[in-house]
Amino acid sequence: MVQTKNDSLKHKIYTIVFEAETKAGRTFDIILLFLILLSVLIISIETVPEIVLNYRQYFKTIEWVFTFLFTLEYILRIYSSPRPFRYIFSFFGIVDFLAILPTYLSLFLVGSQYLLVIRILRLLRAARIFKLTQFVNEGQVLTRALRASMAKISVFVGVVLMVVVIVGSIMYIVEGVEHGFTSIPKSIYWAIVTLTTVGYGDIAPGTTFGQILASLLMIMGYGIIAVPTGIVSVELANIDKNTFNSRVCPQCHKEGHAREAKYCSNCGNQLTNLT
Amino acid sequence: MVQTKNDSLKHKIYTIVFEAETKAGRTFDIILLFLILLSVLIISIETVPEIVLNYRQYFKTIEWVFTFLFTLEYILRIYSSPRPFRYIFSFFGIVDFLAILPTYLSLFLVGSQYLLVIRILRLLRAARIFKLTQFVNEGQVLTRALRASMAKISVFVGVVLMVVVIVGSIMYIVEGVEHGFTSIPKSIYWAIVTLTTVGYGDIAPGTTFGQILASLLMIMGYGIIAVPTGIVSVELANIDKNTFNSRVCPQCHKEGHAREAKYCSNCGNQLTNLT
Amino acid sequence: MVQTKNDSLKHKIYTIVFEAETKAGRTFDIILLFLILLSVLIISIETVPEIVLNYRQYFKTIEWVFTFLFTLEYILRIYSSPRPFRYIFSFFGIVDFLAILPTYLSLFLVGSQYLLVIRILRLLRAARIFKLTQFVNEGQVLTRALRASMAKISVFVGVVLMVVVIVGSIMYIVEGVEHGFTSIPKSIYWAIVTLTTVGYGDIAPGTTFGQILASLLMIMGYGIIAVPTGIVSVELANIDKNTFNSRVCPQCHKEGHAREAKYCSNCGNQLTNLT
Amino acid sequence: MVQTKNDSLKHKIYTIVFEAETKAGRTFDIILLFLILLSVLIISIETVPEIVLNYRQYFKTIEWVFTFLFTLEYILRIYSSPRPFRYIFSFFGIVDFLAILPTYLSLFLVGSQYLLVIRILRLLRAARIFKLTQFVNEGQVLTRALRASMAKISVFVGVVLMVVVIVGSIMYIVEGVEHGFTSIPKSIYWAIVTLTTVGYGDIAPGTTFGQILASLLMIMGYGIIAVPTGIVSVELANIDKNTFNSRVCPQCHKEGHAREAKYCSNCGNQLTNLT
């Protein structure tokens, strides 16, 4: 395959912009992360009335600098990508686009204050940091543990939701409008606030029976947190065991043999000893 | 055994309505689940004053559609069940009956608003979803873990209740009526709210000694959550181990082979397949 | 040894009152537990102003019945105990005495309302239930796990207390009197309320810096709950392993050999196989 | 090496002041810990307006006694240290200096009330207690478990922060100023208060959509606490296993003998002793 000078440049940009294996690529990622976080910080501060009052012009200027930099990055990504359309319609491609769109739209639309908050989605771009090698494994382990726990956790969440709806409905009848339980959805909201031990106190039971039922719900919420915790612990321990004893069979290349294994459990070939 | 055409129809309905092994049965269950959740949603929304005001007639019509469908289902269940009376007086039979009763009663009884909330028990019917194969195992594992932990958790809950009653009584004396601790039951309610880390703030200690005691109770509540969590984790890990690792090598009798193992990891002998 | 008729009676009472091995002993314990819980319930309800108003005389009568029964029990315990003084000055002996004292004192002292609350200590007598065989093992396992975790948990609590005192002091300077942080002890109380995720909201940070610091404290409190949980889980798992593999060496009687052990790890004697 | 009398004295002071191996050293540490805690307690109480009013002179006297004792200790530490400058600029050296500085400064600076609160940093000096042998191991185990979990926990905290910022921003738009969500930073603060299940209730959602979103955030916060808990549990279990079970039989090379094992549980061969 013959590479033209242009292709070579494209590939170079690609390794910097999309990958994190080279030194330049890692530096690019870290600078980008820093810019994203700074930009998100400024978007947040921009909504504080006391601060923004006297410095509106400064914020606008900074914002255009960020938008310019992110637009440049977006163009580089499209240019260097081997399949530009695939990138544009990928999750990160859309996020990258939404991250710069609102600023340009604000030129045409007046009063697009809420539109500007969409820029906070820039933060999602920081998720790219997880492609750095030291985080890839950890992220995978957590994701695998959560996926393996998913069915058990679904059953758990299903039961919790049933409890919350039924207790909420009972409280609606017991407590009624005068204690803030104005409707069943609001009572369910209260039940979730209570079961998860958040406890705002914006709605609180006033009758004796209501307080007894609330007490039971609290003790239940306090106790059953043990269930998801136990599920995830066990799955993490399982993955951990398989990961750390990562011996490979020299014949059939099966991975993940137990520590004390002497023969491959897949093909029966003898395994080399652990040091 | 000779099956009449009628028996055959009955059996066919039975496999659809009660079981989830056939495709028709699974489809029936999923449509039913959808209808139940929709119905519960509508019952909830019906109690929101702002919404219901202008659409009372629509809600009534929808409710009668649901009641008609669920009544039809109830009749089909009775008809197809080999032992109708056993079904009628089973847990789910009673729930199915209570799910349709209030709408019919509302024809005769005026002002039966609270009666209508009973329909929320329809949600319990959604528990039938757990008979779908992918959830059966998970549900069983959780149930087994909780049952195995029951004795330990009883001791734990017993100790917690003692702490709550005694701390509540002390707070009643220390804080008194002026800070909202108007009686021992109310003080116990406060102690539960505090120990479970819910913390509404509807009652909060005002004296220095009360705040010190409350602090101790909080730290205790924060720390001892570790106990049920540890109990359930250990039981789940035990069940997990027993479930996945109960194969024995016929030659060297080594136990605990992984699910996908084909050869013994200790002596290299071929293992019998798992079903 | 010659037993007089008196001694025999004494021993019989002893087995009923103090022990739970005989059927009579178990029945006695369960009735006693029921009476204790009923008595505690009545003491609690007695403090609710609306209830007690019209029934003060009934409550007084019921209380004297309870006091009479518990006094009888106390006398039987002293009479049947082989070493009466040892019982009287034991923990449960003192609790038994305090459980009946306040009612008698109320005859002489007027306005001894708060004294009567001491009777709630009767609840501690319910702890005797844990001598019933099904709870003894579970209680021991939990106690052993907590004792084994004690040193690690002390280090943890020490660090937590340091964090709470220092963050509390900083908040006292940052937030000051106008946001409710009137003194360092009160600020430490707030820090405990926050770190343990109770969050009453009676005191809440008002300044930006205070809210940032509070956010850090919350995330910390939310995350480090993992530490005691992990400690207790590991200790429970260890005990569990030792308990379930409870094989005993026939030569040196050492307990707790691992599942796959073939020889005693203490004296080298061959072990019998597990079934 | 010839030791002069002076060197010998220096060394003796060093073993008492810096170390905890001798009896005198341990006694010194415990007295010091007691003085530090007492001093911190007094600094805290000094800020309570009702208490300090009439006893200001007593507090001042006590404070000077503490400052004198801690100054003496500081001088002894500098004198006995083999490398005084290294001590002075070490973490504990600076803390020791900051612990006495404010009292002296208060002679020259009037109104240095907030300066005096710096003395609360004396509490950090209590961290020296962890050099006592019974805590060293426990502290190391916890530190190792937390360090091993660090990468996984970073990923977890990263995801949590993203959720909090994005949910906070949405709530700012949905709820707006009228329900207390006056700016994005304040909304993020609310999201942290909610996700960590603290739930002050100083800001609470008022709209239906806001309450639905808040409910999701609560359930999420309630569930994902399982993740750090699982991570730390697994790491603690790993360390525990490695610490207690790293002996190998010299004959059959079986690993993982219990701490107190004298003979190999696999072949019956005698094991070498643990130090």
Image (spheres, coloured by chain):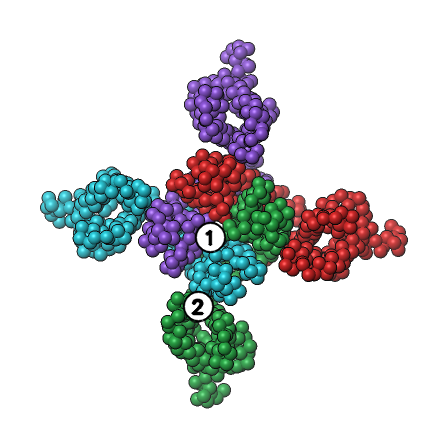
Chain colours: A cyan, B green, C red, D purple
Q: Which mark is residue B47?
A: 2
Under mark 2, the amino acid is Thr
Residue at point 40%, 55% (across, down): D205
Please, what secondary structure does the residue beneath circle 1 have? loop
Coordinates of residue D231 in the picture (x, y in percent)? 44, 47
Residue at point 22%, 51% (across, down): A102
Placement of the C terminus of chain D among the 4 image quadrants: top right
Instruction: Give me the C-alpha separation between circle 1 and circle 2.
Output: 23 Å
| Residue marked by disc 1 | A200
Q: Are marks 1 and 2 on the same chain?
A: no
Q: Chain of mark 2?
A: B
Coordinates of residue A48 in the picture (x, y in percent)? 32, 44
Please tell me whether residue D194 is drawn above or below residue D5 in the rendered image: below
Determine whether, in the image, residue C165 is placed left or right of residue C105.
Answer: left
Q: Nearer the viewer, residue B109 or A142?
A: B109
Residue at point 45%, 18% (across, down): D84
Please tell me whether residue D96 is drawn above or below residue A116 in the rendered image: above
Q: Nearer the viewer, residue A229 or B185?
A: B185
Under mark 1, the amino acid is Tyr
Disc 1 packing (10 Å; few <14; some 14–19; many ≥20) = many
Please report contact status of discs 1 and 2: CB closer than 8 Å, yes or no: no
Coordinates of residue A218 in the picture (x, y in percent)? 53, 56
Please, what secondary structure does the residue beneath circle 2 have? loop
Determine whether, in the image, residue C41 is placed left or right of residue A65.
Answer: right
